[in-house]
Amino acid sequence: RDDRVTWLVCFYATWSSKSNDFAPVFAELSNKYGDLSNFKFAKLDCNLFPDVANRFNISTSSFTKQFPTVVLFQKGQEVKRRPFIDSKGNIFDFIFSYENVVKEFDLNKIYYECKQNPIQVKSTNNPQAKKDD
């Protein structure tokens, strides 16, 4: 909910072979780019949370071609999604390789921008907030 945090979220289904093939790639991406407080990676199992998938217009049907779906959120808003779905409901296939995701979502640029503008944590002068030795 913090608008200062950029999120890359993978919506997946355990029964989807494409989701399973993409899982190690997404893990590698999150290990490389996810070490900042303002650039986070998350996965959501749409089988366990179909209401959330529905909220983001992701079909959980066994016939869907939407898995995996990767969505980039910046300032609390969706800014990019792959695979892309047009206004008529046509799904444009996307090859979920490491290189394609880095390029399509411009992860190097996002990482650099987030690293240059870290979230500033306000320090507290409250003595009760400090741990006792």
Image: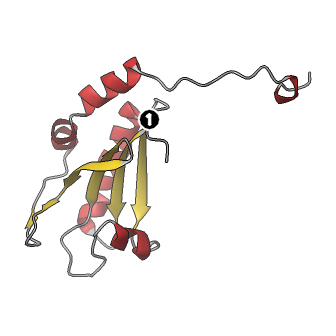
Residue at 31% across / 77% down in the picture?
60
Residue at 27% across / 75% down in the picture?
59
Classify 72 as above or below 116: below
For this rendering, which residue is in front, 79 or 65?
79
Q: Which residue has dot 1 on it?
A: 4
Classify 61 as above or below 72: below
Classify 113 as above or below 76: above
Q: 10 Å neighbourhood of mark 1: few (<14), some, or many (≥20)?
A: some
Which amino acid, by three-letter code, is at mark 1?
Arg
Q: Quadrant of residue 7?
A: top left
Q: Residue 124, image x and y in percent? A: 74, 23
For this rendering, which residue is in front, 118 or 24?
118
Residue at 19% across / 51% down in the picture?
96
Q: Residue 127, image x and y in percent? A: 86, 22
Res 55 visible: yes
Residue at 41% across / 69% down in the picture?
52
